[in-house]
Amino acid sequence: MAETDTYNRPAVSEEITLTEKAAAQVARVKSENNIPAEHGLRLGVKGGGCSGLSYVLGFDEKPGEKDRVFTIRGVTVFIDPKSLFYLGGTVLDFSDGLNGKGFVFNNPQAAKTCGCGSSFGV
């Protein structure tokens, strides 16, 4: 039987994963926008969106004081502790198929999502 947390959800690792396509797209965006190589990818969540929480993507020069820092496929990732609580176990992918182009969060903790794919609820 799988471990669960206090809300009876499956226990999830704090690890974040980037697919090869996502890592390549991050490098492409940095290059095309002249973002210095040492800047990290900021992943986060904020309140709002159709399902309660929205994903946040951006670049920061350096991590915050309490941030967790991951290096995944050559990409430095900064995540604040609150966001990591909601993003643990997430796989960040990049889609450029017929249904649109953009980053895709495959979040095992998302109990519900909206049609736009940019917000979720737990």
Image (cartoon, grey):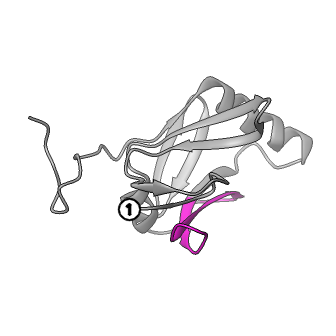
69 inside magenta stretch: no
Q: In the structure shown, which secondary structural element does the residue marked by tag 1 occupy?
A: loop
* Boundaries of the magenta span: 44-62
Predominant secondary structure in magenta? strand
The quarter of the picture where the C terminus appears is bottom left
Residue 117 image position (x, y, % from top left): 62, 51
Relative to 70, 4 lies left or right? left
Question: 21 above or below 49?
Answer: above
Q: In which quarter of the image is residue 60?
A: bottom right
Residue 43 image position (x, y, % from top left): 57, 55
Question: 29 above or below 54?
Answer: above
Q: Type of residue at label 1? A: Val
Q: In the rendered image, which residue does mark 1 sit on? A: 122
Residue found at x 62% / y 37%: 75
Instruction: Kindly give the residue lying farthest to the top in the view shown.
Output: 20
Relative to 29, 68 lies left or right? left
Relative to 80, 21 lies left or right? right
